[in-house]
Image (spheres, grey):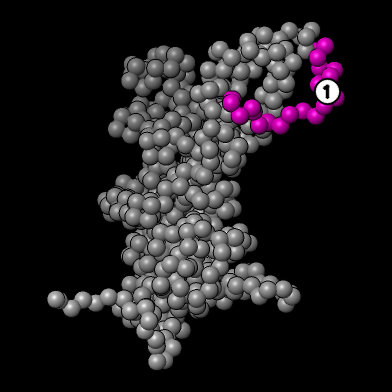
């Protein structure tokens, strides 16, 4: 009969086991312990209990170690972390055989959300000290992450306006006046629609079929609710509002449009360290370029020689701000209308119209002047543009090639035209074209690693402040994984 090894539950230790022997010397839990022990959490703003009464609380150091270990190993839920503290040997070792419950872990996160930015900043500074940040080339980009919001609990402006129109047709003003007296005495309903109307599909069916089942009084109440809902949308400055997470916004997320947040990051080329992180509820990236460069400078203490960004960040206003702060940027230009360079291959593209500053007019490629006509403000722009129009358009033999506008060819000039022109010329240089092509290889693999390898495709929390804290925790973890490799090779110490 072959000999077999089986568990002997009756055995006793001659000497008590040493906690230090429970995990290998190169385990990530040891690295996390060293990293957190090197931080001065009080200086980073972590809240410390002052009262000595009652049961002793868990230290900030202990709870931060548990959270970092969790994100290191794809555990993002406080309940899952609570279970892991009892089931996973490395975490039992790291916590010193302590078992904080999920409420304790959640309260730590909630109370120290703003401090997690400091933890992320420390990972960046350790990377700088270890010469993992080259400051030669950095890339900025944003990625949409789905909000922790119910798709069935949302307000949509177009649907509400259709519903209001249907109600107005059914209700006569006389009936409104009669029943208004009773309704005015009670408080107006909130902007939360009845549950059955919060699903966009059900709301659409209701608009088409369901109004007949409502009494006149119910229709009046519903009308007031719709008005309140439209006012809430107006106040939030959006056409879509989620009642679960009111700070999230509708954004194109992969192949779907969902309530999301826009997670921003700046990544250094050398070892793909994330040097700047922030979350916005604006879908458009065009107003975030300079603030992200400011974030990177604050975290590292230096400015990269060059920073590249895709066309979503193109904005004359942001280029001007970056220029004033001596940030060197390359923002991929998008062909469009107005201040964007358009039809650059055409003989009559805007780039071929020269501005005469002394006469305040444009000169077309054929030498004809375009005179100042008016100043206008385009939608979605914070600034006004000056419009110049050709007055000799009808006599021009090339009018069909130049413009189809019956009033004559026009050119718009923004306050940032000079800096846009400077950027256009900068991008024509062969070396800068190569730098722009590197952007995808620098930043997109990092976002791919976060979303696919770490499974981070949806926020665990609600509200801009909480998701910003979670993003700092995610970015800190990505940096720590790279620092961990340095530590294994003996190239990093926390002294």
Could you say where residue 229 lies in the image, as x and y percent from the top left? 66, 29
Task: Residue at 41% x, 72% y: name it.
Answer: 89
Give the position of the N terminus as an image quadrant.
Answer: bottom left
Could you say where residue 332 lies in the image, as x and y percent from the top left? 37, 44
Q: Is residue 469 visible?
A: yes
Could you say where residue 477 lies in the image, as x and y percent from the top left? 43, 64
Could you say where residue 134 lies in the image, as x and y percent from the top left? 36, 67
Q: Is residue 477 visible?
A: no
- Is 268 a magenta residue? no
Stretch in magenta = 177-197
Q: Nearer the viewer, residue 151 or 438?
A: 151
Task: Residue at 69% x, 20% y: name it.
Answer: 223
Q: Rate crowding at label 1 as few (under 14), some (14 to 19) or many (20 or more) other CA atoms within 10 Å.
A: few
The quadrant holding residue 443 is: bottom left
Eyeballing the image, is 102 above or below 399?
A: below
Q: Is residue 265 left or right of residue 41?
A: left
- Regarding mark 1 in the picture, which secondary structure is present there? helix
Task: Residue at 54% x, 57% y: name it.
Answer: 469
- What residue did someone put label 1 on? 184
Q: Nearer the viewer, residue 403 or 176?
A: 176
- Is 191 a magenta residue? yes
Eyeballing the image, is 253 above or below 49?
A: above
Q: Is residue 13 left or right of residue 287?
A: left
Q: Nearer the viewer, residue 317 or 215?
A: 215
Q: Nearer the viewer, residue 492 or 335?
A: 492
């Amino acid at each position: 009969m072959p000999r077999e090894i089986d568990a002997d539950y009756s055995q006793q230790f001659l000497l008590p086991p040493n906690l230090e022997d429970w995990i290998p010397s190169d385990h990530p839990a040891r690295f996390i312990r060293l990293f957190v022990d090197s931080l001065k959490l009080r200086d980073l703003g972590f809240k410390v209990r002052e009262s000595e009464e009652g049961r002793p609380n868990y230290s900030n150091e202990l709870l931060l170690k548990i959270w970092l270990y969790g994100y290191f190993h794809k555990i993002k839920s406080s309940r899952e972390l609570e279970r892991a503290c009892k089931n996973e040997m490395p975490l039992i070792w790291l916590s010193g055989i302590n078992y904080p419950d999920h409420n304790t872990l959640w309260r730590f996160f909630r109370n120290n959300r703003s401090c997690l930015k400091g933890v992320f900043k420390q990972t960046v500074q350790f990377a700088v000290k270890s010469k993992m940040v080259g400051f030669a080339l950095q890339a900025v980009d944003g990625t949409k992450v789905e909000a922790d919001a119910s798709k069935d609990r949302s307000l949509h402006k177009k649907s509400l306006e259709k519903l209001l129109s249907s109600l107005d047709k059914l209700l006569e003003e006389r009936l409104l006046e009669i029943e208004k007296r009773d309704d005015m005495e009670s408080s107006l309903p909130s902007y939360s629609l009845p549950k059955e109307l919060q699903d966009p599909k059900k709301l659409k069916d209701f608009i088409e079929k369901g109004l007949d089942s409502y009494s006149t009084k119910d229709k009046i109440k519903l009308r007031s609710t719709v008005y309140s809902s439209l006012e809430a949308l107006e106040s939030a400055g959006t056409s879509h509002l989620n009642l679960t997470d009111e700070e999230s916004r509708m954004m194109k997320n992969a192949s779907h449009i969902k309530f999301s947040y826009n997670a921003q990051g700046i990544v250094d080329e050398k070892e793909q360290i994330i040097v700047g992180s922030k979350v916005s509820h604006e879908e458009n990236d065009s107003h975030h370029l300079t603030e992200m460069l400011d974030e990177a400078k604050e975290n590292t203490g230096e400015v990269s020689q060059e920073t590249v960004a895709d066309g979503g960040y193109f904005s004359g206003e942001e280029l001007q701000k970056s220029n004033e702060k001596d940030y060197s940027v390359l923002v991929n230009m998008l062909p469009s209308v107005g201040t964007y360079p358009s039809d650059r291959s055409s003989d009559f593209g805007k780039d071929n119209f020269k501005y005469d500053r002394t006469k305040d007019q444009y000169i077309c490629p054929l030498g004809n002047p375009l005179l100042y006509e008016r100043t206008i403000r385009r939608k979605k722009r914070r600034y006004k543009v000056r419009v110049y129009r050709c007055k000799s358009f009808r006599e021009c033999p090339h009018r069909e090639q130049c413009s189809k506008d019956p009033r004559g060819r026009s050119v718009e000039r923004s306050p940032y035209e000079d800096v846009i022109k400077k950027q256009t010329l900068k991008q024509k240089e062969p070396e800068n074209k190569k730098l722009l092509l590197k952007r995808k290889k620098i930043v997109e693999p990092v976002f791919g690693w976060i979303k696919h390898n770490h499974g981070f495709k949806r926020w665990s929390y609600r509200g801009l402040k909480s998701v910003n804290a979670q993003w700092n925790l995610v970015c800190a973890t990505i940096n720590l994984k790279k620092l961990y490799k340095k530590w294994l090779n003996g190239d990093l110490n926390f002294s």
